[in-house]
Image (spheres, rainbow, N blue to C red):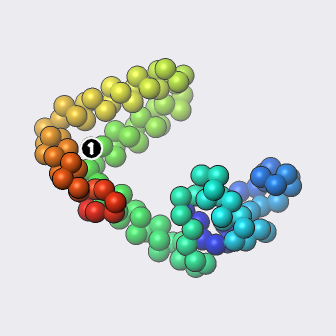
Amino acid sequence: MTDEVAVLGVGMHPWGKWGKNFVEYGLVAAREALAMGLADRVVPPGQARSAAEALAREIAALPQQCLRSDRASTLEGGWLGEGEAMANEFRRGMAVLAAPGTADGVNRFRGGAGRGGAPA
């Protein structure tokens, strides 16, 4: 997430200008970050924190066992080769699916919960 004045780091800018940070390019940089996948949304200036906090509340409302498994897989996978990382993700996912209560969550998802902004 970024607001229309994107500060995403310093380095090789997509337009080839070394050492310039994205804030110098304002809205154009925010839109470029969105297009490149560095951000998944752009909000008006001064609203990034409130939007990020709202997103955090949405994420926190999701099934914790899934979130924790995904987080662990991401942290562990950074040190593994691609095949090992995929096997680790699969192993963790299967453990979540086998856990008590998961079938209820799957049925709620099939019914529309957690889709298109609907509460999980």
**Pick the front one: 106 or 74:** 106
* Number of residue marks: 1
Quadrant in the picture for the C terminus: bottom left
- Asked which quadrant contains residue 20, the reply is bottom right
In screen coordinates, is 36 left or right of 63? right
**Which quadrant, please, contains the N terminus?**
bottom right
Q: Is residue 65 left or right of residue 56?
A: left
Closest to the observer, 18 or 28: 28
Identify the residue under disc 1: 65
Q: Residue at x 86, y 55 (%)?
A: 17
Residue density around tag 1, few if under 14, some if 14–19, many if 20 or more, within 10 Å: some
Q: Secondary structure at mark 1?
A: helix
The residue shown at (58%, 77%) is 44
Q: Is residue 31 left or right of residue 119?
A: right
Q: Residue furthest right?
A: 17
- Check disc 1 and give the amino acid type: Gln
Question: Up-down: is 21 above or below 43?
Answer: above
Residue 88, horizontal then vertical, whole percent: 40, 26
x and y, in percent, of residue 46 in the image: 58, 79
Question: Which residue is at 76% across, 55% downward?
Answer: 10
Would you identify the image quadrant in which residue 59 lies?
bottom left
